[in-house]
Amino acid sequence: MTVQVTINGDRRELPAGATVASVIDSLHNAPEGRGVAVAVEGEVVPRGKWPSTELRDGATVEVVVAVQGG
Amino acid sequence: MNTPLTIAGREFESRLILGTGGFTNHDVLGSALDASGAQMCTVALRRLGGGRDPNHAGSILDVLDAAGVEVLPNTAGCYTARDAIVTAQLAREAFSTDWIKLEVIGDDRTLLPDAVELVSAAEALVEHGFTVLPYTTDDPILARRLEDVGCAAVMPLGSPIGSGMGIRNPYNISIIIERANVPVILDAGVGTASDAAVAIELGCDAVLCASAISRAHDPAAMARAIRLAVEAGWLARGAGRIPRRRYAEASTPDEGLPVFHTAAS
């Protein structure tokens, strides 16, 4: 069983039951701790809920980090 | 400078806020930050791995943390209140701060604020407990509306972002300052040190500067120049400028002027 999700614009196939936490772990360059945030379907998922937030089939995930700007 | 800048109860010795956009690398940013004396810097949020240089990801916070400055996240690139609100919420999660520099732009050529979306986003974010510092036009009525919905400061543009054209409508900026009960921070348009001095002399509480420093030939030198200009503007403002006159007023007295030739013959 797998789910199709879109992570930062890229389609990915993940095992069913994949969570936000497992997605973050799978991304290299993801900074430890401060400076990263996640939205699923346009809703922010607080860090504390990453391990318990499962991604449903078709989910859109945005993972953002701090960059120069403003 | 003797009187600290106070925004939402927080005090800053420096009246220069550094925008971090446009620096060629983090070393240049670090040296400019040091030279600027700024105590608060903006950062943006972008997709992980989506930047031009993935090595930049994450590490800008190391630069800012090493300098001991406050992070002011922005909503740069948002065109709608809805996107700006989600971005602000992401920023709060990423940086553990309720402060947000709210930018909601109308198009990508002028980068001018979309007034309708801006006020809507500001109102919602204030309701969600954010300390909102909105990038706005030099329209005094819009500035008042932003203050009315609870913004902690207003940040009118001097001229479009990155244009370096200075303050195109000093009269409007003055009206905003006269009527505001929150700090007025000139945002956008500063091209060189004198523009920053003018902003502070006009009565702005602070200046936010990015491109003028980051895109200067020598960013650290320009950072120092603008820092000194802000201080000079503050001193000049306190000292009180002379009134403008259309005709000369001699500073040398006429009394005792020697007469070398008689009018006779």
Image (cartoon, coloured by chain):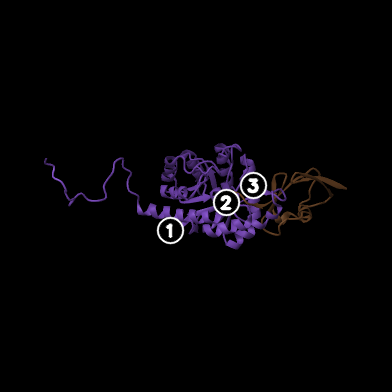
Chain colours: A brown, B purple
Eye-nearest disc, 1 or 3: 1
**Residue projecting furthest to the left:** B264
Circle 3 residues within 10 Å: few <14, some 14–19, many ≥20: many
Q: Is disc 1 on the same chain as disc 2? A: yes
User: Residue B30, image x and y in percent?
Assistant: 59, 58
- Residue to which mark 1 is pinned: B3
Circle 2 residues within 10 Å: few <14, some 14–19, many ≥20: many
User: Mark 1 belongs to which amino acid?
Assistant: Thr
User: Mark 2 belongs to which amino acid?
Assistant: Ser
Looking at the rendering, in which quadrant would you find the C terminus of chain B?
top left
Numbered badge on residue B87 = 3
Q: Earlier in the sequence, mark 2 or mark 1?
A: 1
Q: In terms of secondary structure, where does tag 1 sit?
A: loop
User: Residue A36, image x and y in percent?
Assistant: 69, 54
Eye-nearest disc, 2 or 1: 2
From the viewer's side, name the closer residue of B121 and B184.
Answer: B184
Q: In terms of secondary structure, where does tag 2 sit?
A: helix
Chain bearing tag 2 is B
Q: Earlier in the sequence, mark 2 or mark 3?
A: 3
From the viewer's side, name the closer residue of B254 and A18.
Answer: B254
- Residue to which mark 2 is pinned: B214
Q: In terms of secondary structure, where does tag 3 sit?
A: helix
Disc 1/disc 3 C-alpha distance (Å):
33 Å
